[in-house]
Amino acid sequence: MIIAIDGTSSSGKSSIARALGKKLNISVIGTGSIYRAIALKMLNFGIDENDDSRINTMLDSTIINIGFSAGKISVIVDGILQKPNDLNSPNVSKFTPKMACKEIVREFVRKIQKQEALNHKDIIIEGRDIGSVVFPNAEVKIFIDADQTIRAKRRLADYIAQGKNKTLEEVLSELEERDNEDRNRELSPLIMTSDSVIIDTTSYTIDECVEKIIKIINSKK
Ligand code: C5P
């Protein structure tokens, strides 16, 4: 069974997907981490988001392996385990939507997602376009959202935990910019498909959301 979890930035979808995977003992692919890992490699190599030729050459020699164990997602790029703090840095968050709108990048990530789905009987895949483009026939489609200020407060708490200095206003405008880019791009924009179930996490805990999704999964069996 494919369980597609899409949603807005900092809505809690990654935490929910990981908690659900841990509870049901099902592997989780956090596709945002894959896009972030590619963005980080581009930044490290000084590759501009408009330089298709260098992006192509880079992707040709990039090997990404992903794993899920004990509720934690790992991303290994060219044999090197990526640090969550590097993948989630403000720089990488800002740059990722600028390269994630490109077909060569999306195609590269789609191949990884399809291969992982073939390797597992059941899988939870979390991102922006999973239920709409990558797996339109997914048996379960969830769309996660939350009030924008709550999302910004959650992201700010993550930054503070990483020792980064930001104001709520800065984080709010960062989120707004990223959501706009993800919703308004031509390829695979963030949308809620008509067959998705929406979960607004504004006033629910992660465990409550997990329970709701388990009920939806059981109703499909
Ligand atoms: O989910 P996360 O915030 O880690 O995603 C980072 C960025 O990766 C998003 O803002 C979006 O631009 C891109 N992304 C995407 N498609 C996905 C998952 C993430 O374009 N399926």
Image: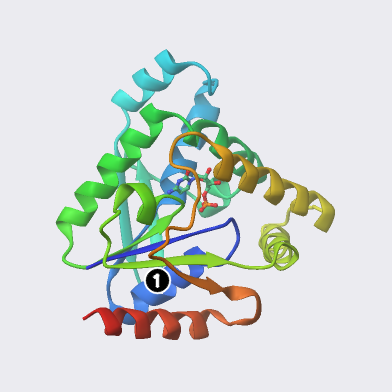
Crowding at dot 1, Cα within 10 Å, few <14 / some 14-19 / many 20+, comes out as some
The percent position of residue 78, horizontal first and vertical second, equals: 33, 36
Question: Mark 1 sits on what residue?
Answer: 71
Question: Tag 1, which secondary structure?
Answer: loop
Q: Residue at position x 44%, y 83% from top?
A: 212
Q: Residue at position x 26%, y 79% from top?
A: 220
Q: Specify whether residue 110 is in view.
A: yes
The percent position of residue 162, horizontal first and vertical second, equals: 67, 58
Which residue is outermost to the front? 194
- With 144 as the anchor, is 117 left or right in this view? left
Looking at the rendering, which quadrant does residue 108 occupy? Answer: top left
Between residues 35 and 178, which one lies in front from this camera angle?
178
Q: Residue at position x 62%, y 48% from top?
A: 179
Query: Which three-letter amino acid code belongs to the residue tagged 1?
Result: Gly
Between residues 81 and 66, which one lies in front from this camera angle?
66
Query: Does 215 sit above or below residue 140?
Result: below
Between residues 123 and 78, which one lies in front from this camera angle?
123
Q: Specify whether residue 78 is in view.
A: no
The percent position of residue 172, horizontal first and vertical second, equals: 76, 54
Query: Does 26 sit above or below residue 60?
Result: below
Q: Quadrant of the N terminus?
A: bottom left
Q: Quadrant of the C terminus?
A: bottom left
